[in-house]
Amino acid sequence: MLNIQNFLKTYNNHKILEIENLQIPEGIHWFKGINGSGKSTLFRSIAGIIPFKGNILFNNTDCRKEVVAYRLLVNLSEAEPLYPDYLSGYDLLSFMAEAKKARDGQLKKLADSLGVSQYWKSPIGTYSSGMQKKISLLSAFLGSPKLIMLDEPLITIDDRSVQIVYELVKDYYEKQGVSFLLSSHQDFRFERLAIKNIYLVQNQTVTQQ
Ligand SMILES: Nc1ncnc2c1ncn2[C@@H]1O[C@H](COP(=O)(O)OP(=O)(O)OP(=O)(O)O)[C@@H](O)[C@H]1O
């Protein structure tokens, strides 16, 4: 499914991650690692939103050679999303829904289930961190992705929203065959999800536990 080869990510000539060859199968996978180990950097690289050396392919679609096709297949929810203050959640998500070719009604359904439609017409600058986080989580489910990465999906959201996110993950996995890469420091909370593999991000590389 996901194929990472000869991967090298540096910042200011400082190596952050090096992965010679990693194949991640379909399923729900959990990425662990201490603060600063490189989980977000890995997810952003797989999403194709930051530069890196090497190759990343999802179902044989190359992250950098087939950019449009790849981005319809792979979605990311950032750990700490930063959005322009002056846009409304509705404007932002509508734009993303169009870019991700979301089917009619998908955005509204997700917004209703996560409670986002109660506040999404207000500017993002007025949102709490949990309200912003829900915009980011929702955006990762838009369109027809085959891989969704949720970076620290549980931080800042309330218990009810945590349950809804679990249900969405289960639903997308079981009914649509969507795979997930999840990063979290809270292992016990994932017990209700069928975690297939656990990957450890440490010593500037990624290994299966
Ligand atoms: N834009 C950047 N410029 C320079 N260094 C960066 C940048 N982004 C991340 N880093 C560095 O890369 C390393 C990995 O950071 P990353 O955010 O990927 O870690 P993480 O495992 O997601 O951490 P956390 O659990 O705290 O979220 C850290 O040393 C960080 O300082």
Image (cartoon, rainbow, N blue to C red):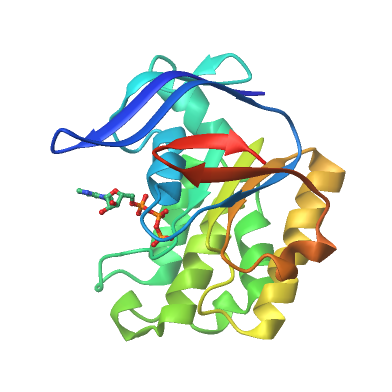
Q: Within the image, what quadrant is residue 193 found in?
A: bottom right
User: Which residue is depicted at the point 48% across and 80% down?
Assistant: 130
Residue 164 appears left or right of 39? right
Residue 115 x/y as whole percent: 62, 79
User: Which residue is depicted at the point 80% across and 64% down?
Assistant: 191
User: Which residue is depicted at the point 45% across and 48% down?
Assistant: 39
On-image quarter of the C terminus: top right
Residue 177 x/y as whole percent: 79, 38
Look at the image and tell me whether residue 63 can be seen.
yes
Residue 35 x/y as whole percent: 40, 61
Q: Within the image, what quadrant is residue 88 found in?
A: bottom left
User: Which residue is depicted at the point 29% across and 80% down?
Assistant: 125
On screen, residue 114 above or below 175: below
Q: Nearer the viewer, residue 82 or 205?
A: 205
Residue 183 x/y as whole percent: 56, 55
Look at the image and tell me whether residue 120 can be seen.
no
On-image quarter of the N terminus: top right
Residue 141 appears left or right of 21? right
On screen, residue 138 above or below 199: below
Q: Nearer the viewer, residue 165 or 106?
A: 165
Residue 22 appears left or right of 113? left
